Image (cartoon, helix red, strand yellow):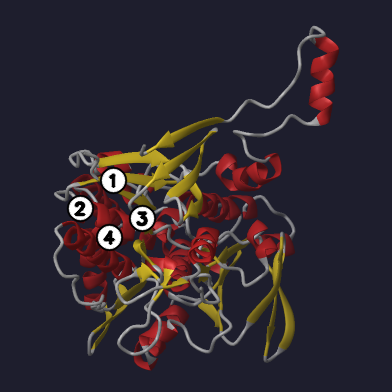
């Protein structure tokens, strides 16, 4: 007799915790993920600024789940879901396949939102993937190297100006780390520039940094940023981004900030898959594309489909949508697993999902952070220690925790950065791949085809490689 089939899309916090919670359940799980690793996204900015290596925040999924026999890990990107036939259509590297399910967990995370200006992405990478972080690392450290070569003061200043868009936790942490690089780690290493003269500009359209943390912590964070030399431009809207600068509108009017290195840390949206699932299921989405779910995290009209984390919109106790943070996804994953197990055992469903807010934290610099935990508002050194402990706890794998602490010691107690290696490939590969097209299914350019025909036998025909097809779950 075939066991209950659970398909999980996404190996982020929601998907991974749901799978681990089902380790003893009588189910067969198929995990579909676009990468072979689980990404600890809250520490991406430390990869981008040379504190950590990518391996420390991205353990291999197969290694994490190697002792869980009821899981089959599949590399690929879910393209659409047929809610009537209960089939997920997946595009893998050079092969399309399908996965059949009895229960589906959709936890594919979020993508960067440029608020309708997707062309900004060409010049201001977001902070949602390892590729983003490595590209930014190459751009940030490369900017100091190139500035050291400049003889034109204006060009030098342009290379030493770093603009971070978005004053939420990611933007504040990123700006703080770039400032530490410029003022603490790099001085004395260059002959022709003083890294301390670098400008780090934090821009946001709202009127406060860390505006969800409350006025007290927001003010503390703003003061610390100023002490570090970060220029904070609030109530400032970005209207254009190009290769050599960024244009903004503020109370002072329209301005251009010359800068070769821009970081986008403002706004998130659900991936296109969320809208496709909602349309197929007849459900609604919000403006960010998140699926409006039932109190048990299922898609209306489809109790066999759960949407978790950044894919869902569910009101919390205060009536506002739950935030897109790791704890919402983790608790949602555990809850979905509990519902599935109770269904299989034909037991009453648990109470509706209730999110327990464990608080919010953001680090500004070494020895300085802010933390909002219940009624407590902490800032400074003790908040920073709390931030360290929480992030080490949620890192997957002992090896990752151990090496992360070692690298933190090098960066925070000393003046070094363990991961400063950056390559041209990291800096330019994303745009090159965008121009090149899908490397697995790319059709040869006409001139390539003609060249082959001129040198090959008459019967030779240049054609794209066939895409294999397979079915999983039958």
Above or below, comparing residue 362 to residue 438 in the picture: below
The C terminus - image quarter: top left
Question: In what element is the residue under mark 1?
Answer: strand
Name the residue beneath numbered marker 3. 104
- Residues tagged 2 and 1 counted as in contact (Cβ below 8 A): yes
Q: How far apart are marks 3 and 1 (CA)?
A: 10 Å
Question: In what element is the residue under mark 4?
Answer: helix
Name the residue beneath numbered marker 2. 22
Q: Distance between the residues labelled 4 and 3?
A: 46 Å
Mark nearest the camera among 2 and 3 is: 3
Give me the residue at 29% from left, 54% from top: 16
Give me the residue at 46% from left, 66% from top: 174
Residue 26 relative to residue 320: left or right:
left
Q: 151 or 129, which lies in front?
A: 129
| Other-residue count near label 3 (Cα within 10 Å), few / some / many at <14 / 14–19 / ≥20 | many
Question: In what element is the residue under mark 2?
Answer: loop
Name the residue beneath numbered marker 1. 29
Which comes before the other along the chain, label 4 or label 2? 2
Asked if residue 223 can be seen in this view, the reply is no
């Amino acid at each position: 007799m075939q066991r209950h089939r659970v398909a999980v899309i996404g190996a982020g916090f929601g998907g991974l915790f749901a799978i681990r919670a089902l380790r003893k359940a009588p189910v067969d799980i198929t995990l579909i993920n676009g990468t072979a690793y689980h990404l600890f996204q809250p520490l991406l900015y430390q990869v981008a600024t040379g504190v950590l290596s990518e391996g420390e925040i991205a353990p291999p999924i197969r290694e994490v789940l190697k002792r869980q026999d009821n899981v089959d890990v599949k590399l690929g990107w879910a393209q659409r879901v047929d809610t009537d036939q209960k089939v997920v259509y997946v595009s893998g590297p050079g092969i399309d396949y399908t996965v059949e399910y009895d229960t589906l967990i959709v936890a594919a995370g979020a993508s960067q939102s440029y608020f309708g200006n997707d062309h900004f992405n060409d010049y201001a990478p977001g902070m949602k993937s390892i590729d983003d972080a490595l590209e930014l690392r190459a751009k940030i450290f490369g900017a100091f190297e190139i500035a050291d070569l400049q003889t034109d003061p204006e060009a030098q200043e342009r290379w030493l100006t770093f603009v971070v868009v978005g004053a939420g936790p990611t933007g504040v942490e990123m700006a703080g780390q770039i400032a530490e690089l410029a003022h603490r780690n790099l001085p004395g290493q260059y002959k022709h520039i003083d890294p301390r003269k670098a400008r780090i500009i934090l821009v946001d359209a709202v009127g406060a940094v860390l505006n969800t943390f409350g006025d007290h912590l927001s003010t503390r964070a703003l003061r610390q940023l100023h002490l570090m030399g970060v220029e904070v431009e609030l109530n400032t809207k970005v209207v254009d981004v190009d290769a050599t600068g960024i244009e903004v509108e503020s109370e002072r009017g329209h301005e251009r900030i010359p800068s070769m290195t821009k970081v986008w840390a403002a706004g998130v949206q659900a991936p296109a898959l969320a809208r496709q699932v909602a349309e197929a299921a007849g459900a609604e989405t919000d403006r960010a594309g998140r699926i409006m779910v039932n109190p048990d995290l299922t898609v209306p009209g489809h109790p066999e489909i759960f949407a978790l984390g950044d894919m869902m919109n569910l009101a919390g106790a205060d009536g506002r949508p739950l935030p897109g943070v790791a704890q919402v996804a983790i608790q949602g994953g555990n809850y979905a697993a509990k519902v599935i197990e109770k269904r299989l055992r034909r037991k009453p469903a648990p109470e509706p999902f209730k999110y327990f807010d464990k608080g919010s934290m953001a680090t500004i610099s070494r020895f300085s952070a802010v933390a909002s935990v219940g009624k407590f508002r902490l800032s400074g050194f003790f908040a920073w220690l709390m931030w360290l402990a929480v992030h080490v706890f949620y890192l997957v794998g002992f090896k990752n925790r151990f090496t992360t602490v070692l690298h933190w010691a090098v960066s925070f107690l000393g003046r070094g950065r363990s991961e400063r290696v950056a390559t041209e490939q990291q800096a330019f590969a994303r745009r090159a791949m965008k121009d090149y097209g899908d490397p697995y299914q790319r059709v040869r350019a006409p001139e390539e085809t003609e060249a082959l025909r001129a040198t090959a036998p008459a019967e030779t025909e240049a054609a794209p490689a066939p895409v294999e097809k397979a079915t999983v779950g039958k």
